[in-house]
Image (cartoon, rainbow, N blue to C red):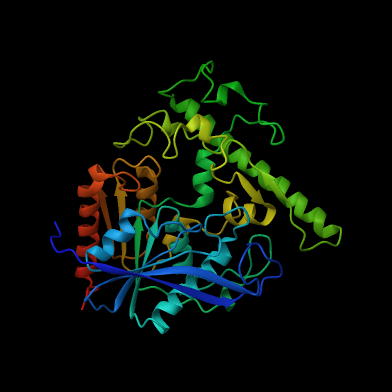
Amino acid sequence: MTTKRFEYDRIPYLVIFDDTSAYRDTYGGVTESVVLESYLLKPKGVPSDTVIIFMHPIGGGAYLPMSNALPRAGHHVIYCNSRYRGADYALIMEKVVQDLGACVKDARERLGYTNVILAGWSGGGALSLYYQQQAQHATVTSTPAGELPDLTQLDLPAADGMMLLAAHVSRHGTLTEWMDPSILDENDPDKRDPELDIYNPNNPNQAPYTPEFIERYRAAQIARNRRITARVKEQLADLRGRGEPLMERGFVVNGTMADPRWLDLTLDPNDREPGCYLGDPRIVNMGPVGLARFTTLRSWLSQWSYDDANGDGPRCAADLEVPTLVIGNSADNACTPSHTNRLYEAVGYHDKTLRTIEGATHYYSGKAQVPYLNKAVDTITDWLGERSWTSM
């Protein structure tokens, strides 16, 4: 176990750059600029040329146990919020890649760090992989809606290392695995296939589920995602056909928190407790904080479309050219082992490491999780040290 602990300063700062978007998809602040709220967590009296950068598509992790335990262990950490902090209804993944690039560039050029290690936490995993893929060899010239930004025209400095911590394969992949396939009519969520409604006590299919039911369920989830995508594309084409190339439409997606793994612990097994990380999954399934509950046409294609979104973790991981650490938590009910293993297996670089923190939950939240958090930090410290990314 790491025994030395440091006090650290939490230094707030802003990363600002011009917003050249054809329209604004965030609210508040100076509309001509993108303003990224950032924090440098800097151990006192511990100089370093290496910094660990966290960014999640919708942010909010600057006070999580992991992002604060690392500076206590002597690591310099930046938590940078994307422009979509706390609100992903209009999020464009390509713009989040642009945001992360601005943070990495600022860390190198203004703050003076030589080595940048991306820490892809949870939903930040696929973002970090998408960013690194494009920073190494940019290929994406537009969003899935066919609009800017063109990532090949941006200054995206590549990171030197990658850490995937309790990471999902992607936002669109995770949404699809969590979608409620029993909903038959997007305009009337009460119209359901009772045999696919896992929260219906009268459903003849109850946990533990048969392989046949899971196969049918997963296929229906993908089919529902594709139906929504088809409708989105039709609406975009209709708006453009009417001479409204910038016009948007917002819509609600009900029933997006119905992963059978929350009810059946024999599926993708680990040490997790039953239920969803946000509470009672039956309630969360229709509640306001479910994935993709409020979205827009363009955001759906960039963020949630099973076939169209570019930020796919395994596809991007195949192109990695930097050392990569993948950590899974054995009691995680938000990111189960199949996601961790798919990411690790997909990493195309020869220097890759897989570790599991036995007993750890997704957030390491609460006093009982402190030993597991410390073990995860020790694992990260050892991995960084083996590659000479240590404090000076």
- Please provide percent x and percent y for residue 14: 48, 73
Q: Nearer the viewer, residue 355 or 16?
A: 16
Determine the residue positioned at 40% across, 47% down.
339
Q: Is residue 388 left or right of residue 11?
A: left
Determine the residue positioned at 32% across, 72% down.
51
- Residue 390, image quadrant: bottom left
Determine the residue positioned at 48% across, 26% down.
212
Give above or below for 340 relative to 152: above
- Residue 246, image quadrant: bottom right
- Please provide percent x and percent y for residue 241: 84, 58
Determine the residue positioned at 64% across, 60% down.
144
Q: Nearer the viewer, residue 204 or 211?
A: 204
- Please provide percent x and percent y for residue 236: 76, 55
- Please provide percent x and percent y for residue 161: 34, 69
Q: Quadrant of the N terminus?
A: bottom left
Give above or below for 222 relative to 382: above
